[in-house]
């Protein structure tokens, strides 16, 4: 008998022959009544408590397909069609093509594993009609409880319906499964260029709408390419670059709360109790991917000046290499010349194969004050998924307003921001 509160350790849902989904569930309500023929009838409400990632993908595929036959979730893709779409939409521009071409064998193998296997660390959402890819968006679990949204692109056909559709698909997936522990989805994040209209209107707009930095936050970074210098000498006396200690992260937390007060440290696993947590890196390794992280603290006479996070992943996991780069947070810019910082970056650059290492520097004011030339600005947007309701309200209102004004949310043909195209 299905009693309210009963936990079902393994519930099997069979939709058709061999299409089976397993989950852990609980009975949340029971209504006794009668059918039209006056025979007793009982209706029970069942809540999912747990479901592995493969079954999540199967269920999401079924639901999204039922809503729109052109919507696909983490299906085995025709990679030739995907690459054709990337080039057609301007997703891959000349500079990026040169990077891909130089690593083409690695890229092919990497994307074969990402798009042909239903892995626990990646999801992709595709809008496709008659074999033609019209919209694409993907996300990867690069942090313990945060997924990175990236590689958003759409063709100009269909008044950008495809671009909005994949964004909605992602939203529905997140809404359906974020509460399950196996999803490890407490935060959704992405990097975007503030001069790109689409993400600024969507992610920047929803941040203003929520108006609570613990709900949605944006932190801007200067994007710099550091080149390895084999002739660089070490740090002068009084300066030390050492592995970060838990108390350093506590100091970093205090600095960030005063400076921003957003979600960055929670999303990027930069809290003191996350030091030494290698569970996700081991999962990557098990699946045949690379993920390593190292933390360093730059100090002068014991004073904490800068924090350096070294993220190492497969080249191309993110096409702007924002998962294979250095993040620097300046806590105390006083008496910290850029030469000292450059020497520190050069010391940690030995972790990378490439000679030019993409680096994100926060806050941007340090780059400005030190006259450090930077290529572009990236905003890191983080959404706390306890705030999904206002996110959806804003997005639906935005779409409704655009329909009334007979406008579309534009997808520029060539975009250098990570969300739209990279």
Image (cartoon, grey):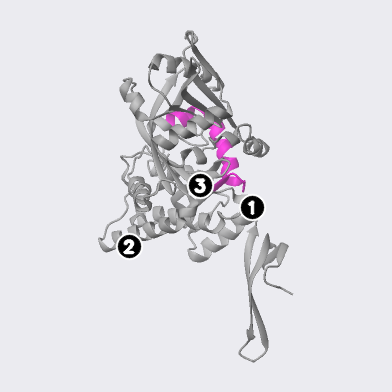
Mark 1 Cα-neighbour bin, 10 Å: few <14, some 14–19, many ≥20: some
Q: Nearer the viewer, residue 138 or 339?
A: 339
Q: Which is nearer the N-term, disc 3 or disc 2? A: 3
Residue 230, given in percent of the width and then of the height, sits at 49, 10
Q: Is residue 117 magenta?
A: yes
Secondary structure under tag 3 reads strand
Describe residue 338's horizontal placement relative to residue 144 as left or right: left
Residue 286, how many percent across, how many down?
68, 38
Between the residue at mark 1 and the residue at mark 3, the CA separation in whole angstroms equals: 20 Å
Q: Earlier in the sequence, mark 1 or mark 3?
A: 1
Q: Is residue 82 left or right of residue 58?
A: left
The prevailing secondary structure element of the residues shown in magenta is: helix
Question: Range of the magenta residues?
Answer: 97-123
Q: Nearer the viewer, mark 3 or mark 2?
A: 3
Cβ atoms under marks 3 and 2 closer than 8 Å: no
Which quarter shows the C terminus? top left
Q: Nearer the viewer, mark 1 or mark 3?
A: 3
Read off the residue under disc 1. Answer: 54
**Of the residues tagged 2 and 1, which is closer to the observer?**
2
Instruction: Pick the residue in front: 243 or 257.
Output: 257
Q: State the quadrant of the N terminus.
A: bottom right
| Closer to us: 11 or 107 | 11
Q: Element under label 1?
A: helix
Q: Is residue 230 visible?
A: yes
Name the foreground residue: 237 vs 314.
237
Q: Residue under label 2, please give it.
A: 400
Q: What residue is rendered at 58% in x and 41% in y?
A: 144
Q: Residues within 10 Å of mark 2 (few under 14, many from 20)?
A: few
Q: Earlier in the sequence, mark 2 or mark 1?
A: 1
Residue 413 vs 7, above or below: the answer is above
For disc 3, the marked residue is 187
Task: Please name the residue shown 62% across and 51% down the image.
Answer: 181
């Amino acid at each position: 008998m299905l009693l309210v509160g009963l936990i079902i350790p393994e519930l099997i849902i069979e939709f058709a022959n061999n299409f089976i989904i397993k989950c852990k569930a609980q009975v949340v309500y029971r209504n006794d009544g009668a059918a039209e023929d006056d025979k007793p009838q009982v209706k029970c409400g069942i809540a999912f408590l747990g479901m592995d990632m493969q079954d999540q993908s199967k269920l999401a595929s079924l639901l999204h397909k039922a809503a729109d036959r052109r919507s696909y979730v983490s299906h085995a893709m025709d990679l030739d069609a995907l690459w054709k779409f990337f080039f057609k939409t301007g997703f891959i521009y000349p500079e990026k093509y040169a990077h891909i071409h130089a690593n083409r064998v690695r890229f092919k193998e990497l994307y074969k594993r990402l798009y042909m296997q239903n892995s626990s660390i990646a999801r992709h959402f595709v809008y496709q009609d008659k074999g033609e890819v019209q919209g694409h968006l993907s996300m990867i679990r690069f942090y313990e409880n945060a997924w990175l949204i990236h590689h958003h692109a759409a063709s100009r056909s269909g008044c950008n319906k495809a671009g909005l559709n994949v964004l909605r698909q992602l939203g529905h997936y997140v809404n359906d499964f974020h509460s399950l522990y196996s999803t490890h989805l407490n935060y959704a994040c992405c990097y975007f260029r503030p001069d790109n209209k689409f993400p600024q209107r969507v992610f920047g707009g929803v941040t203003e709408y929520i108006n609570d930095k613990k709900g949605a936050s944006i932190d801007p970074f200067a994007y710099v390419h550091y080149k390895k210098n084999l002739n660089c000498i070490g740090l002068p006396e009084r300066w030390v670059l050492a592995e970060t200690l838990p108390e350093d992260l506590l100091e970093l937390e205090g600095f960030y709360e005063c400076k921003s007060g957003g979600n960055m440290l929670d999303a990027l696993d930069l809290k003191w109790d996350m030091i030494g947590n290698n569970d996700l890196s081991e999962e990557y390794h098990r699946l045949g991917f690379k993920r390593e992280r190292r933390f360093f603290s730059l100090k002068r006479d014991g004073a904490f000046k800068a924090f350096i996070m070294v993220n190492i992943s497969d080249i191309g996991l993110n096409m702007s290499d924002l998962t294979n780069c250095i993040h620097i947070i300046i806590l105390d810019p006083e008496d910290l010349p850029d030469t000292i910082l450059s020497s520190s970056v050069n010391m940690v650059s030995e972790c990378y194969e490439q000679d030019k290492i993409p680096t994100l520097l926060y806050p941007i004011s340090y780059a400005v004050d030190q006259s450090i030339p930077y290529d572009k600005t990236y905003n890191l947007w983080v959404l706390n998924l306890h705030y999904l309701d206002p996110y959806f309200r804003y997005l639906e209102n935005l779409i409704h307003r655009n329909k009334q004004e007979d406008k579309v949310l534009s997808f520029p043909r060539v975009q250098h921001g990570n969300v739209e195209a990279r």
